[in-house]
Amino acid sequence: MKHILLLPLLLLCIKMLGQDQVSGKVVSEKGDPLPGATVFIPNTSIGTVADHNGEFTLSKLPKGIFKVAASFVNFTTGLKTVPKALRSTRLIIRLKPVEAELKEVIIRKYDKDGWEKWGTLFSNTFIGESVYAQYCKITNTQAVHFVHNQQSGLLQAFADEPLIIENRALGYKITLELNDFSYDLNRNEVDYQVYSFFTAMDGKRDEMEQWEKNRSDVYDLSLMRFMRRLYAGDYAQDGFEVRLIERKPNLEKLRIQELYKASYIKLKTANSGMKEKNIIKAVEKSYPRDSLRYYRKILQQEDKVKRFHDELLPIDSFTSKTDSGTVIFFFNETLQVTHKKLKEPVEYYNYRNRLNENNVLDKSSVQQQLNSLPPVTELTLTQQIPVEINENGYFNNIDLFINGFWGWWEKLATKLPYEYYP
């Protein structure tokens, strides 16, 4: 009788186990298996290597929607999105070969001594400039190559192989698939696409204890923590504060632009043969010196000015739950996020105030100034595409523009895999 009762439980356990894993095959465009391909869930430590038939199985899956990435030498990285309803579906990940002709063209354009020229900029972009960054290094920098277009000011980076990063501050080895990296040096804007895979490092007991402490400290300041609290619906109880920032037209700038325009038209009409540059000079000479100084100052301002709202926003004004178990994060203007219980790191204080080591003589004296300075971040949906958040804090960030503290903080030196919980 006992055996009969245990059988349904056994079947139930097997069924649940099957739901917590996803299987599939990595193949080329022609359908040939790619044995040895690396298969992983980006930004986690969940991964494996495809067998001799290109087959793979991933287990201990995150809840909600996630992506599966596959990489292989001389092939571009493949990516599959796996919604909850398709977890039991067998995945076929097809990888495209890197075009040989394209590789030759790129190689011919590589900057000589590129890492010496651009390595610091590249490292700061990915690893960051926090106190943890000094313990985080790219071990195979020889695989990174740069192409710099002096005319456009565009810097591009390419990698011959996955980049290996050792983070001795948090105790992780990170394998980074670099799909795209473009840095506009004129605008100081960067755009990149990477897929990272975490492997916990082994260490001595005191090292591992320090890693665990560092991970907890990093998590406290992380965007992941905020996203998880949005999902749970208790961000305010956790100390986060969200306020609205409206961007209104800069009326004073518009007024001065119209003033310049009217003066320009008047002078051009009266002096039809005058050269363009001379008309502009004449416009400025027509104003008193103090007024001209003020006008120039205002014209350098943004086209829109910020209007900060003091009142805190309720969570239901920018989040809603879906039937699939995720949370939608959506808003029209800009949100300011702070944490009343946390203080910004000294390095960010220095960065924000454009200080360097010569300006900061005593770290403790700077720390005293930070007692009332919480980290502040501004979030904007550039194309008004909603952000979908999973329970573990994972979110699709293709449209979320992050400015301020998290824009500076969220780098590999302070990055945790999504299955991490303090």
Image (cartoon, rainbow, N blue to C red):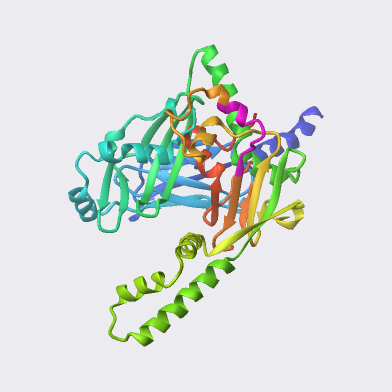
Q: Residue furthest right?
A: 1
- Residue 215, can we see it? no
Give the left or right position of residue 201, taking residue 367 as reference: left
Give the left or right position of residue 285, taking residue 9 as reference: left
Q: Nearer the viewer, residue 202 or 129?
A: 129
- Which quarter of the figure has residue 120? top left
Q: Quadrant of the N terminus?
A: top right
Q: Residue at x 46, y 67 (%)?
A: 288
Q: Quadrant of the C terminus?
A: top right
Residue 119 pos. (x, y %): 32, 37
Magenta region includes residue 107: no
Residue 330 pos. (x, y %): 65, 58
- In this rendering, is residue 252 above or below 403? below
Q: Which residues are magenta?
A: 366-376
Q: Residue at x 42, y 83 (%)?
A: 266
- Which quarter of the figure has residue 287? bottom left
Give the left or right position of residue 322, taking residue 197 as reference: right
Residue 376 pos. (x, y %): 61, 43
Residue 375 pos. (x, y %): 61, 39
Q: Nearer the viewer, residue 42 or 187?
A: 187
- In this rendering, is residue 95 above or below 385? above
Give the left or right position of residue 398, taking residue 9 as reference: left
Q: Residue furthest top?
A: 205
